[in-house]
Amino acid sequence: MNAILVYYPFPLMKTNDSGSKVRPSNMINGFKEWGEDIEVYVIEGTSKERKEAFNKLEKSGKLNNVWFCYMEFQTIPFWLTDPNHLPLRPFLEISVMRKLKSLNIPLGIFYRDVYWKFDEFYKPDIKSKIVRFLHRLEEKILNQFSDVVFVPSEEIKEYVNVDKPMYSLPPAGEIKSFIKTKSHIPNGIYVGGITSKQYALSLLLSAYELLNEKNIKSQLTIICRSFEYNKLSSYMRKKLDKPYISVHHASGEDLNSFYQHADFGFVPLSKSTYGDFAVAVKIFEYLSFHLPIIATDCKAQSRIIKADRIGIIAEHTPESLKAAIEQMIEQKSYYAMEIPKVFEQKHTWKRRAEEVKLALIDKYIE
């Protein structure tokens, strides 16, 4: 029997309350759902746990059954992923990758982010210099051992310095079973950060002020973390204190009831170099509940949304976003028919698992 090795050089999180935590466990589920006649070996945890698990797999002879290996790098270098962030076993992953190479097992590595290449994310101190040095070293190891490099979007490729085939593997969603609640007034939902400049919450609020200036045309539900809400200035809290806005704190399965009451979802990323190659997990979480998307015109998310006709793109102005909301309200019935079909055909985690196999076995590896 063929097997797939899924290797994560970090411990999996028990709660999926952020985009970076969603992908690992869902990719495992995608492989399991797709490979009905294929065994899935999963290695994750602390460096000690990973070493023991890989040694056990090797001694059992099961490595000889492995068809290909899917690995992910974290947002921090893999040497630092133990709870104390110390490089306790600095050569573990290199030895694992060397072993896979010696057995001619194709290796695809998902390279999550290149934020470390942007000065604005770092303080000019010694700690930052060390972390960035390790990221550069990690990128060289990525180039040395991978057969295919998976990245979140096409747009991020120019920032990844490797001489290997790169394959876009954006996030995905789960097929959900739910009953849609019809609302008298169209309800938009925003789930995400409210304090980071990366998310243009003030733009969204300004658009809703224009939209509901004379009468309420749409309600807005905002789901955010409570500690972020507590950090908001009095000015921002005043902007949120409107009869058409409700603010809630929820994550995981607790979000489901809010999605069921929504008609469309917002992804108002700020326009920037970083924003242009970002692809938010929440796009596909919205799609899981058959919600069309209203997003700002950052390159990666615009390309995906336009290509699959799963939403409307607005320029980074309140007037343009207001117009997009009005257009969405008019075309709501069209999206209600089309979104479920597109989502299940192209954007489930099972489909992402199939794309890994396509890249590693069918397309690049002869």
Image (spheres, rainbow, N blue to C red):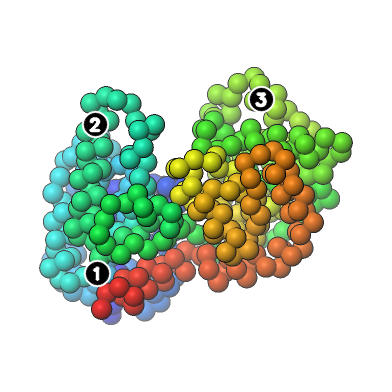
* Image marks 2 and 3: residues in contact by CB distance under 8 Å: no
Q: Which mark is residue 49?
A: none
Query: In the image, what residue occupies the spot 16% across and 51% down?
Result: 92
Q: Amino acid at mark 2?
A: Lys
User: Which of pointers 2 and 3 indicates the residue nearer the eye?
Assistant: 2
The quadrant the C terminus occupies is bottom left
- Which residue is label 2 attached to? 129
Say which residue label 3 marks: 237
Crowdedness of circle 3 by 10 Å Cα count: few (<14), some, many (20+)? few
Query: Regarding mark 3 in the picture, which secondary structure is present there?
Result: helix
Residue 31 x %, y %: 39, 68
Q: Is residue 25 left or right of residue 74?
A: right
Identify residue for label 1.
106
Q: Nearer the viewer, residue 183 or 139?
A: 139
Q: Earlier in the sequence, mark 3 or mark 1?
A: 1
* Quadrant in which the N terminus is drawn: bottom left
User: Vertical placement of 46 versus 120: above or below?
Assistant: below
Q: Could you tell me the amino acid type at mark 1?
A: Pro
Residue neighbourhood size for the residue with mark 2, other residues' Cα within 10 Å, grouped as few (<14), some (14–19), many (≥20): few
Q: Position of residue 355 (x, y in %)?
A: 41, 69
The kind of secondary structure element at disc 2 is: helix
| Residue 54 quadrant | bottom left
Q: Residues within 10 Å of mark 1 (few under 14, many from 20)?
A: many
Q: Measuring 52% from the left and 51% from the top, which residue is drawn there?
A: 299
Mark closer to the chain start, 2 or 3: 2
Kindly check if marks 2 and 1 are in contact, taking CB atoms under 8 A apart as contact. Answer: no
